Image (cartoon, coloured by chain):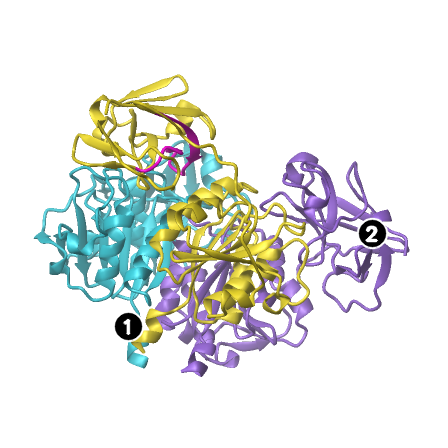
Chain colours: A yellow, B purple, C cyan
Amino acid sequence: MRLMISTTPIITLLTDFGERDGYVGTMKGVIVGIVPHARLIDISHQVDPQDVRQAASILAEAYAYFPAHTVHLVVVDPGVGSDRRPVALKTPGGTFVAPDNGVLTLVRRREPAASACVLNNPDYWLPEPSRTFHGRDIFSPVAAHLASGVPLDELGTPVTDLVELPLAEPVIASGSIRGEVFRIDHFGNILTNITDLRWVDDHTAACYPTGLGSDPGEPVYFDARSARVTCGPHTINGLSQTYSQVSIGQVLSLIGSSGELEISINQGNAQEKLRVGVGDLVTIYFKS
Amino acid sequence: MRLMISTTPIITLLTDFGERDGYVGTMKGVIVGIVPHARLIDISHQVDPQDVRQAASILAEAYAYFPAHTVHLVVVDPGVGSDRRPVALKTPGGTFVAPDNGVLTLVRRREPAASACVLNNPDYWLPEPSRTFHGRDIFSPVAAHLASGVPLDELGTPVTDLVELPLAEPVIASGSIRGEVFRIDHFGNILTNITDLRWVDDHTAACYPTGLGSDPGEPVYFDARSARVTCGPHTINGLSQTYSQVSIGQVLSLIGSSGELEISINQGNAQEKLRVGVGDLVTIYFKS
Amino acid sequence: MRLMISTTPIITLLTDFGERDGYVGTMKGVIVGIVPHARLIDISHQVDPQDVRQAASILAEAYAYFPAHTVHLVVVDPGVGSDRRPVALKTPGGTFVAPDNGVLTLVRRREPAASACVLNNPDYWLPEPSRTFHGRDIFSPVAAHLASGVPLDELGTPVTDLVELPLAEPVIASGSIRGEVFRIDHFGNILTNITDLRWVDDHTAACYPTGLGSDPGEPVYFDARSARVTCGPHTINGLSQTYSQVSIGQVLSLIGSSGELEISINQGNAQEKLRVGVGDLVTIYFKS
């Protein structure tokens, strides 16, 4: 009994479907029809419509907190019905089912030991799939079958040339890293593509200046109090450890919960006040 | 063990409660207090407040993708506390618990072999139900008891005269069907009440021009490339198979994932651009 | 088997994280990694950012409808990373895990027989917790361990001086209660801090005029038809039993589903029309 419980299939769902139309519920109906005892956990259904990059970012932050046998079902699929391929990707950190449009780019950087296939075996689809809702007709049943133990190579043809998103890489110089705004979160926190930062002690931070998720190499240590962050016309002096280290309403920069450089306002909305957008330049200057 | 798992009770929830106030969570608390091992799956809680017709449409698209033993709990209930009746409807395709305000109209058309009862047996309610939250006090406990195996006729008095929504029927002529905008989805896709369309091959589509969910009779075949769709001042030539068949930002019409005529913009929001609303006229012209 | 099922761990989640970023999904990943068979039920993730009072109100309305062995995980945490304490509170009506910022104030009034501890035993946290996402790194793993049976006193040091929210108390006079707007719900219903109202018969209501959740003492009976409610410049005559007792679009006052005085519009949005806000004065006048 214990064993059985400990291997309960888990499927997460990440889409741009919103939560109004019942599209997500329909996908879940398909899944529980195939694997009745699967656990279903929503990552997000409020990805901006067709925003593959945003979905890639949310997925990359979340997946590693799930058990490794989890199947992550990602349907942000502007090319549905075209010749873009539906794929599955199996990695030591989780299994992924998604359209091959780059949404798995960041996961693949973090999980180099992966194998993938094109989902071209219709035995694992719903019969007569529609041309506009592969989330329901192809991706959900495939995720359910994967979660119930069907091996990857049953689902289709092996593939290695998955689509990569063209992501801007941070530019490393001696004493600075120049990156950009990568995502704005629900609180208006400004998340950047300058990642792999961490605290060493209460005043010292470290960065691994080799960009998103790749082998970090040797860290560079710096005094967080004398660091300086610029974002458009704005300058923030020092790196805070917590939001509440500054006064309510004041702008700060800190190391976010996934190790990324983040610009925030204590109990406020930084994006609304600073009016920056995805792609805007952000630079951190430090003395190592 | 297998048997037990395969008959896990499933309850879906569809309301206009939004997701801010904890009303839905409270209903789920009531349910798991009665049937601890039920699976709970949200269809939507973002139906526009009191929009019974919209809820009917979302329900009709979703329910058939769930196992037949699922109990669908629908609480869009502008008449709560009045003399509108709470009802349950049992069909071969699913069991439904809802206020008798027409929200089950489309389900009943698709599931003619159904039996219903008025939920007038307070043994299956919470004690001392409020006058304003029957979702919590009546519908949720009844759905839980149904899912756990209580037979329909225990719950109240049989009834056959359920309320019907007055839904506009498409008007069929030789070579055209005139209908109306039925729902706008999260993407801004414009869904119509012209349904039962399907693809025969890459150029030929078929329609069953007898209206919403009724016996479709003999199909009419037509060349999709020469079809024409009008919606207010807008005309779209040809029926596309997929969104990406036209350029990004271009308006198209296609057969939606539930067989309905749909007007969309590839990677855009058709409703924002075309500024049409529910009830606006839509006509498809075709040569059979 | 039955026994096991009937004691399935239940964890509810209440946050201000929104549902776009995957923060809630990440917390659930952490939980199912620790207690794979827990039931997870969302109360709300749309609390206004940092609005501890609103969260306290939603929690107080919802928790009592869950089985008593439920663990309620509350993360509305403007002071994350500061010296505000993370705490757990065990009561006969449920167990609660939250930052010690007052969010449990209303629960504690309703559950006087409670014990609490500060969560200062890192054995039950994720390793190396971040400074900005204790929901993921401290509160979720603690809630999971509590739900799986770890006793409260394992989690940290006992504590009795939990933070109390400064909540305005209704002012009782002979023949009136003066309170304030406490929360606006999804429908635009105006909920007040005048609580503990109930119907005795179709014309008679009762109030227990001693404020929020405390020992109600002797009720005061009054004729609901001659009661009068004022809210800013607005006056509503009589207390309705249901929304639909007045015409569509008309303002009414009634006893809400949690016993609170509520001002609404039948099938409309009272807040949009009356333009009142949280903290605005509301008075009910009655003849006992």
Mark yes or no: residue C194 visible.
no
- The three-letter code of the residue at mark 2 reads Ala
Q: Position of residue B5 (x, y in %)?
A: 43, 77
Does the magenta run of residues contain C105? no
- The three-letter code of the residue at mark 1 reads Thr
> Can you say which quadrant of the picture contains the C terminus of chain A?
top left
Q: Nearer the viewer, residue A263 or B19?
A: A263
Q: Is residue B56 above or below residue C212?
A: below
Q: Circle 2 sits in a helix, a strand or a loop, which is it? A: helix
Q: Which residue is mark 1?
A: C7
Q: Is residue A202 above or below residue A59?
A: above
Does the magenta run of residues contain A194? yes
Mark-to-mark CA distance, 1 and 2 = 57 Å
Q: Which residue is mark 2?
A: B224
Look at discs 1 and 2 and give the one toward the viewer: 2
Q: Residue furthest top?
A: A233
Q: Position of residue C152 (x, y in %)?
A: 15, 60
Q: Nearer the viewer, residue B75 or C251?
A: B75
Q: Position of residue C73 (x, y in %)?
A: 28, 54
Magenta region:
A177-196
Taking C89 as reference, is B241 left or right?
right
- Disc 2 sits on a residue from what chain? B
Which mark, residue A100?
Answer: none
Do the residues bearing badges 1 and 2 touch, measured as CB atoms within 8 Å?
A: no
Taking C10 as reference, is B105 left or right?
right
Which residue: 51% across, 47% down? C266
Mark yes or no: residue A238 visible.
yes
* Residue A3 found in image quarter: bottom left
